[in-house]
Amino acid sequence: MANKHVVIVGAGPAGLSTAYELSRHRIESTVLESTTWIGGISRTAQYKGFRFDIGGHRFFSKSQEIEDFWTEILQDRMITRGRLSRIFYRNRFFDYPIRPFNALKNLGVGTACLCILSYLKAQAFPPKEVRSFEDWMVMSFGRTLYEIFFKTYTEKVWGIPCSELSADWAAQRIKGLSMASLIKSILFPGSKKKRGEVIKTLIDSFRYPACGPGEMWEAVADRVESRGGRIHLESPAMRLERNAQGLVCVWTEKAIAYRGTHFVSTMPMRELVAALDPPAPETVQKAAKQLGYRDFLTVALVIDQAELFPDNWIYIHDPSVKLGRIQNFKNWSPQMVPEDRYTCLGLEYFCFEGDGLWSASDEELIALGRQELAQLGLVDPAKVVDGTVVRQAKAYPVYDDHYRGNVQTIRNFLDKEVPNLQLVGRNGMHRYNNQDHAMMTGLLAARNIALDAHYDLWAVNSDAEYQEEIREGEDTSGRLVPERIKP
Ligand SMILES: Cc1cc2nc3c(=O)[nH]c(=O)nc-3n(C[C@H](O)[C@H](O)[C@H](O)COP(=O)(O)OP(=O)(O)OC[C@H]3O[C@@H](n4cnc5c(N)ncnc54)[C@H](O)[C@@H]3O)c2cc1C
């Protein structure tokens, strides 16, 4: 096909990686972005010279191609940082990943004995049926340890009681960690893991752009534009006009039509289906409407104190506060603060769009953050000198009982009726994955267009590796997340 022109919806990692790869193949593209910023969830927000992420974005990938991409773009602006992240519980810091000696020391002899007794009780009286996350964890570790290390944070993140989350998630996620292995590592602290056994959560360093993830995506956007690609901010795709062959053009809110030969979407699948014109069949619309999301907000507080704690981030397991995690952005990169005398903390609250937290005013949320930090004894409230709030809708695509079937229904329809549209990225594919996965799907989508290739984007796994063959029963759907118990 002569004169390919690609319209890409979304200027996050997936959309920009698509545009960048197309520019390398000298194919024209136009990126439409609804907001005023570049980088999507991987942007860096700024407030009076303080920079902060939506969450904290570590740059690591098992894919060498992705690692090389980051190096090519930012060169020595990619810094390597040591990782320190601990759990804060009952006014004490526990190492994370959990180290038995440290945990024992912090818990004290009394609580440690309680942990052992409650474990023995769970062994003597195992539940008749192990259905929930709570059943599984209590059975494996005893109630006391479960309540200290697993219950509160899990419930804060997912907004669902652990007694309603399915046990499968615990069995898959916590596999390899058991009371027996904890006791073994106390008795034989020198025993090492087998060679080559690498657990992702244990990695102790990561790369990071000196001015936050947004620096990466702004640099990619600049390269795209310098090679002739167009990026339009404040241009939400509202209507996707199609005919018998597929998509014809994307209409933005400003009633401008962007015509293309090929289309790539990173917008949430739910919204994509709703924007199709003529509309998709009723079954497809119903499937799209059922896709769910978990939302997220950051209260960024400026503290007039140069040093607070050495962690990059801290998990807050204390059930008396709503706060889930604290990022200390200066420990991600010193360039995240304008003056060394200040620290900027990102207080992370997990919520649902429209709930009490989400709808609270910025002033209320800043006051809540300040009060919770004081309650935890982590920061002197008098030193909190300023603050701001950033809300991120659809931060996490939710994996409920029906999401797989719903995604498949949408895919089947689009494959058949809209063949010149490719879905890429996180909400674009309803996959709970990192930047590297989003980028890889974007790169392969671009190659499908530029080289008339046939990469199956759904065969990119959560390690951003393209799998030529997916074995029967293999799950490529993304990172593990809990599901509600099936009735
Ligand atoms: C709390 C948190 C922590 C994270 N930590 C890490 C980490 O440590 N490391 C890591 O690699 N990843 C991390 N991630 C994941 C990472 O943020 C995502 O994988 C990545 O941003 C996905 O890129 P994307 O382009 O697919 O989607 P997005 O980043 O969501 O970008 C999509 C873009 O499309 C735009 N858009 C949506 N609808 C429309 C429309 N109708 N018209 C035009 N534009 C539209 C959006 O405004 C957005 O800019 C984290 C995510 C969260 C929520």
Image (cartoon, rainbow, N blue to C red):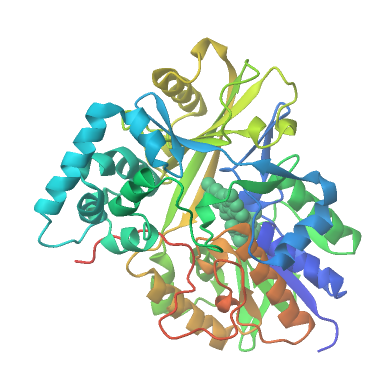
Q: Quadrant of the N terminus?
A: bottom right
403 and 440: which one is in front? Answer: 440
Q: Position of residue 160 (x, y in %)?
A: 30, 49
Which residue is at a point 85% across and 75% down the rendered structure image?
25
Q: Is residue 356 left or right of residue 84?
A: left
Q: Is residue 374 above or below residue 241?
A: above
Which residue is at a point 56% across and 85% down the rendered structure image?
415
Q: Is residue 429 above or below residue 80?
A: below
8 and 73: which one is in front? Answer: 73
Q: Is residue 298 above or below residue 66?
A: above
255 and 400: which one is in front? Answer: 400
Q: Is residue 269 above or below residue 325?
A: below
Q: Quadrant of the C terminus?
A: bottom left
Task: Please identify the residue farthest to the top as the structure is shown.
Answer: 382
Q: Is residue 420 left or right of residue 452?
A: left
223 and 465: which one is in front? Answer: 465
Q: Quadrant of ligand 1?
A: bottom right
Examine the rendering and report whether any part of residue 321 can be seen. Answer: no
Q: Is residue 68 left or right of residue 474?
A: right
Q: Position of residue 248 (x, y in %)?
A: 68, 78
Q: Position of residue 167 (x, y in %)?
A: 27, 60
